[in-house]
Image (cartoon, coloured by chain):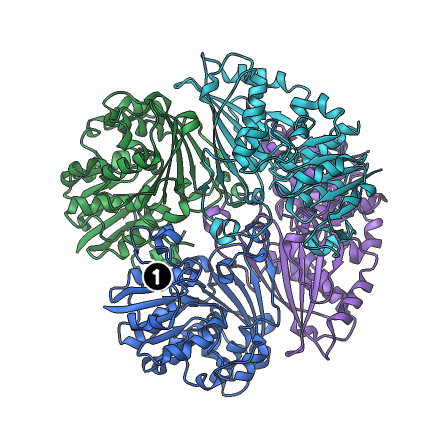
Chain colours: A purple, B blue, C green, D cyan
Amino acid sequence: MVKIGIAGASGYTGLELIRLLAGHPEAELTVLTSETFQGQNIAEVFPSLNGVVDLKLRPLDDSITQDCSVLFLALPHIAAMDKLPVYLQSDCKTIDLSADYRLKDPKEYSDWYSVTHTHPDLLEQAVYGLPELHRKAIQTARFIANPGCYPTSVILALAPLLKTGWVDLSSIISDSKSGVSGAGRKPSLSTHYVEVNEGISPYGLASHRHTPEMEQELSALAGKPVRLTFSPHLVPMTRGMLSTVYINLNKPISDEKLVEHYRSFYKDEYFVRVLNPGKFASSQHVRSSNFCDIGLKVDSRNQRLIITSALDNLIKGASGQAIQNMNIMLGLDEKMGLTAPAIFP
Amino acid sequence: MVKIGIAGASGYTGLELIRLLAGHPEAELTVLTSETFQGQNIAEVFPSLNGVVDLKLRPLDDSITQDCSVLFLALPHIAAMDKLPVYLQSDCKTIDLSADYRLKDPKEYSDWYSVTHTHPDLLEQAVYGLPELHRKAIQTARFIANPGCYPTSVILALAPLLKTGWVDLSSIISDSKSGVSGAGRKPSLSTHYVEVNEGISPYGLASHRHTPEMEQELSALAGKPVRLTFSPHLVPMTRGMLSTVYINLNKPISDEKLVEHYRSFYKDEYFVRVLNPGKFASSQHVRSSNFCDIGLKVDSRNQRLIITSALDNLIKGASGQAIQNMNIMLGLDEKMGLTAPAIFP
Amino acid sequence: MVKIGIAGASGYTGLELIRLLAGHPEAELTVLTSETFQGQNIAEVFPSLNGVVDLKLRPLDDSITQDCSVLFLALPHIAAMDKLPVYLQSDCKTIDLSADYRLKDPKEYSDWYSVTHTHPDLLEQAVYGLPELHRKAIQTARFIANPGCYPTSVILALAPLLKTGWVDLSSIISDSKSGVSGAGRKPSLSTHYVEVNEGISPYGLASHRHTPEMEQELSALAGKPVRLTFSPHLVPMTRGMLSTVYINLNKPISDEKLVEHYRSFYKDEYFVRVLNPGKFASSQHVRSSNFCDIGLKVDSRNQRLIITSALDNLIKGASGQAIQNMNIMLGLDEKMGLTAPAIFP
Amino acid sequence: MVKIGIAGASGYTGLELIRLLAGHPEAELTVLTSETFQGQNIAEVFPSLNGVVDLKLRPLDDSITQDCSVLFLALPHIAAMDKLPVYLQSDCKTIDLSADYRLKDPKEYSDWYSVTHTHPDLLEQAVYGLPELHRKAIQTARFIANPGCYPTSVILALAPLLKTGWVDLSSIISDSKSGVSGAGRKPSLSTHYVEVNEGISPYGLASHRHTPEMEQELSALAGKPVRLTFSPHLVPMTRGMLSTVYINLNKPISDEKLVEHYRSFYKDEYFVRVLNPGKFASSQHVRSSNFCDIGLKVDSRNQRLIITSALDNLIKGASGQAIQNMNIMLGLDEKMGLTAPAIFP
């Protein structure tokens, strides 16, 4: 059994890590941290864990790496930045769910996050933990920067196209929609039930911090700079994410040919399901699973491709992907603990 | 008082007409039809109307125009097509909320609706009832084709741009999101609570029937053929619609300049609210009102404009707009009965 | 026109007062206060009011009564307690939506609210503003304690029975269900979208502060002490309240006889709708209206009556009722500004 | 591996059986039936099962028992009644999720279901599959009548009290609340998103068909006839059930003593979690798990006990309990395949 620590256990991605790891055959939860709830049992904070997990919350300090061999950081952005170098001095493999080490270029980080990166030297060491693209590097990594939820949905939607020459890389738009759990557990007016319910709201149009992360990965795949317009929206639902991605085609292509190409590209990827031609991805059908569904539809009147990409923001978009990374790092079956089907309805 | 008839009173747009007209100072409801519920009082069908409206439902027959001088047709598509010529022989002014007379070109109709139009001669007589564009023609019309909800949100979002030369008319994409009431009251798996709830689903991508209606109006405004990619999505909420519209800019323009231009374009339009620069439209803030909110945001990194356009699909997207048309046809104050503020929360 | 002030205009009951009064033919909004948002226009705080209300928020100070002749206090509990005596020295008629002056007995107040009442002498002056029971006193009152949402639904459900001798007054249970807007606009974990959504939760069982208010009014009606078991629940919806009230019958009675009795009791009450025998009240059918729907159903196998009582917690349960009280105090038509039908769907 | 058949695989309880059994270490799905979708792959009907279950739907005929050794009947009420005797002639162990064989008294069946039972002789053979009460009989049963969702929540809430003498058995009321999935997948106006959303509705007050099932079991526990008032309500959520149960106490008892008694009564029951004194059960915390949470709260002012009992209507209220029964019948670990923690949020 591998001893597991979770820093920031009382947030939603922390809780989701706990829940998924409680059913993982090789994992043993040994460290859970929370500043707010320290001293309480995790099942007091989350009654859903009653009778399932029995562990006390402790403060986040430097000693926690003594009690685990894999450490997940489910902390707010910035908070992880200075903790990480300390943890890297231990033998603990570390998976950081924050954005702090995702960007290779410290200037990009300061431009989008309005703060100077305090450990730019470590950025190159961090492996961007999208297994479908970086599995090899993850296998030998000690330190993973776990992707954001939006980037996972958008990068997986576009990855198979970037080397084909079929598309106009200057025309990418992702209109993305997320459930409210993506905003975290800290109460605020923008997550108040009454403000969110029965409405659909754009936010952060053309300025959301997940943009450079997508562009970094898409550019690497394309072998040249790629930019996109990214428009996130808040949907009145707890979980789920859908990206509707638009890209102009350089020539007519059929849905069938595209599906075939995508299925070939993802042929070894259990967690990416390419739908039949003409089918659209819906967040309902991946809810509570680690799957990313991808649908392909050509708008032939306008020679434009519409890609729909759906995932559960807390699982493939965060904690499930983090566990997938852990499995790879530890040489375990990549799917271990992650095969629960989507729960519908 | 003007005597009002509503054909198809037991659907959602019918109900919304009743509710709004019950508070209209010049309207008197005299005819409500329903095949399914004929013989029942409307307040038995909709307990929300208890103590407010007291009228029996009668079948849809040719005599109804004898008892009203304005007739709203809130019937399913196709159903209105053959009824209309009969009603046009009466003195009744008619406002058709279906799609049957919205397209000028009968071939477009048969292409998109898969049925041959039986009265193509009447298509030219119908006035497309978007007051912000066609007020003059509406004033003297006897017969209005009331716009669809999606087209209202998209056309109002784009109208001010089409003559400016600022934009690339071949680059238009509308990613639109609707509440479930837009799908009507007939039970089906796709409107079942459990299927819709907690999920976001695209449907009819690049093939939705509202597309030609938008293209007809946008082309007329531009003075040349305009096409767009239209992507509707179903959102788990009862009411509300948001269109996020993308269009490439031919040159850099500021949010401020765009807002100024839109405000000038809509300066006499009470029901179009152009938001301050940098503000996005949200469906919550127009819910249950006849307003359409428009927000403008330039993605300067990609020289692309993102327009957010929000309305209540049952009001400005259907019944409220129909009453606005009625007011214009009757020479009444255009806002009469329609000034209730949005209900938030 | 009557000049109106609203203290606490940036909360949900404040907003609802603004919205309703914006359409009231005799009201002119002159004072809106908010500590948090002072200096901003109310339409910046609530974009739903854009183009409808144009007034700046000012701080809550003693001078506000100089600019209005009716003052609504939509402040948190306790906050209104010490402000009220000051306002009473002006000519302003005051309607307090908080609980601070609802209980006649200061000991009851301190028992349930865990704070000593600082102005017990004023408690007798306050008129409990439930027009269906206290219309006469309201007409001449200068100072109204506006009822809570739960008490309104429960007292109206039971009032017709208390003098009949038909029921066992020791057997009353109210199992009540509320939408989330009842919890106010202040962000907290218990109103976080993700915590509330897709769940039904009891809270404050047998200890909720609205209990003594119900018992005070029911005892007064019965002419002897009446107690009840009160169980509130939080339902994942924005607005709406349903109380399912249970009481044992002393002898068999039919649904028809009960409906007849209730209709007779409420024969002059526009805002109370007694449903046909066998019909149940649902919150959907009163949403956004000032109606309270009451349904009656005898469980004859157990000689027990089940009363269902539905209202909109922000309207008949708060701001609508407050305006109803204002209308009575001013000698206006009691229904003025409050006749908008329920919005369904 | 045990070969499993599911008759009625395209409804919600059928789907939930499939999903749970797909992760059950000893189960192999071999037969799925559906009249509507026969010939299609189950993953076409439910895209959530894509890549997880790959089986074609076949019609419901008498031969299906040749291909499985456990058969679940997830058919509508009445439909199972005549099929069952046929299946009982095979070696197949059968678990019927309908109500057809739950009542021992055929007269009760005809009284509440308005149809004469065609196989009254088989009623005595059926074991009522509530493991916490009837585990021993289930072990040797060939034929289980799986309990309804409401009865499971109410019977577990009350079972520990019935022999104590602490309570007045003539005073039982259960005010129960259910998510919409309990109404099944067949589209109807009462499950239409727009009709259900944003409202709370009572239905079937004092006349719901689950009543006699509760009374049968409670009477058996008490050793004398017990009746109750049962009030179901529809809540705008997909899954989840909460029963708030009221019963008068014969003498004062503390929350602590009650909790201790309940914990003793359920000490060997993994799936019943008795909450700490003063804690209430919420449906959120059992969602998607097989747990039933029970909270106890004395209303000492009225000497009345309030029991809150929460479960997931599709799992402990239907398919999870059916699998629990299967495990017991097969001599497997009762928890096998059912230990997934609740998913919150």
Residue A307 at x, y percent in the picture: 68, 66
Residue B338's quadrant in the figure? bottom left
- Front-lying residue, A178 or D298: D298
- Front-lying residue, B239 or A151: B239
Residue C11 visible in the displayed image: no
Residue D235 at x, y percent in the picture: 50, 42
Q: Is residue A118 above or below residue C182?
A: below
Residue B168's quadrant in the figure? bottom right
Q: How many marks?
A: 1
Q: Is residue A23 above or below residue B250?
A: above
- Chain letter behind tag 1: B
Badge 1 crowding class, 10 Å Cα cut-off, few under 14, some 14 to 19, many 20 or more, is many
Q: Secondary structure at mark 1?
A: helix
- Front-lying residue, B55 or B295: B55
Residue D24 at x, y percent in the picture: 77, 38
- Front-lying residue, C57 or A154: A154
Residue at (75% x, 34% y) in the render: D88
Q: Is residue C220 left or right of residue B345?
A: left
Q: Mark 1 — residue?
A: B18
Quarter of the picture holding the N terminus of chain B: bottom left
Residue C93 at x, y percent in the picture: 18, 43
Q: Is residue B78 left or right of residue A268?
A: left
Q: Is residue A173 above or below residue D143?
A: below
Three-letter code, disc 1: Ile
Q: Is residue C5 left or right of residue B299?
A: left
